[in-house]
Amino acid sequence: MHNLGDGLVPDLDCQNVGRAYFPYGARDHDVRIRLSHDSAEVPGADACCLLASDWRDIERVRLGLYLNGFGSRWGNCVAFNALSVAGAGKRSVRDVNIFVSTRGLNAGEMPTPFAFRSYVEGRLQPSSDQQYVRVTLEVDEIRGATKPIAVYSTPSTPQPLNVGPSLWRLIESGRKQVPGFDLRLQK
């Protein structure tokens, strides 16, 4: 979906897919995905769901992702990709709420719940000028994730990021840092 899926409201059941949701410039999406991976042989992707911004900002997106089975098929549950396009200017992610349920994953099958990346001409960048405004992330249970949030491209200025109680507890308990983000507990 590239800037054409405005107003998307699906309720999806997916089986053994690499990437279940991959919109560019999403606006007004309310998505619920139940995804099951029942074989360690079926390949996944770097992210189960990937939200990309290129010519358009990502605005007003709600995503509920419910995972079952082999979670190690994905590197991340949900990733935000800022794709730099000449002349597009700074991109932003606004009014986005994401909930990930991992209770149905097999033991030892926990991917990193959330990731932030920025690309220029297809190459991963160490920093990003993408802005995050009123973004809330939550996961119901984290078992064995090496980090709750992976930041591959650090925002050039600190960005506010709301995290739910479960994600907050994991970050606080391990004294894990999330570079480039000013974390706020969302109650």
Image: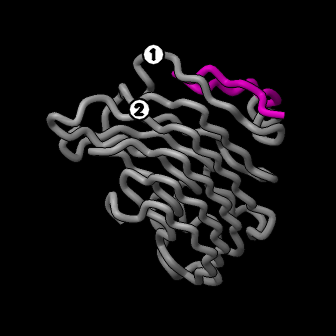
8 with respect to 162 (left or right) = left
Taking the spot 64% from the left edge, 24% from the top edge, the residue there is 177
Q: Amino acid at mark 2?
A: Ser
Taking the spot 52% from the left edge, 17% from the top edge, the residue there is 158
Taking the spot 41% from the left edge, 40% from the top edge, the residue there is 117
Residue 4's quadrant in the figure?
Answer: bottom left
Look at the numbered discs 2 and 1 and tell me whether their residues touch, using CB distance below 8 Å. Answer: no
Q: What segment carries the magenta color?
A: 172-187
Residue 173's quadrant in the figure?
Answer: top right
Please identify the residue farthest to the top as the structure is shown: 157
Q: Amino acid at mark 1?
A: Thr
Residue 25 vertical position relative to residue 36 in the rendered view, above or below:
above
Secondary structure of the residue carrying numbered label 2: loop
Q: Is residue 180 magenta?
A: yes
Please identify the residue farthest to the front as the structure is shown: 7
Q: Position of residue 14 (x, y in %)?
A: 59, 80
Tell me the crowding category of disc 1: few under 14, some 14 to 19, or many 20 or more residues within 10 angstroms, Cα based. some
Q: Position of residue 31 (x, y in %)?
A: 60, 64
The residue labelled by disc 1 is: 157
The span from disc 2 to disc 1 (Cα, nearest Å) is: 12 Å
The residue labelled by disc 2 is: 153
Coloring scheme used: one colour
156 with respect to 122 (left or right) = right
Q: Position of residue 3 (x, y in %)?
A: 33, 58
* Mark 2 vs mark 1: in front: 1
Tell me the crowding category of disc 2: few under 14, some 14 to 19, or many 20 or more residues within 10 angstroms, Cα based. many
Residue 54 numbered mark, or none: none
Taking the spot 50% from the left edge, 34% from the top edge, the residue there is 151
Secondary structure of the residue carrying numbered label 1: loop
Quadrant of the snapshot with the N terminus:
bottom left
Residue 2's quadrant in the figure?
Answer: bottom left
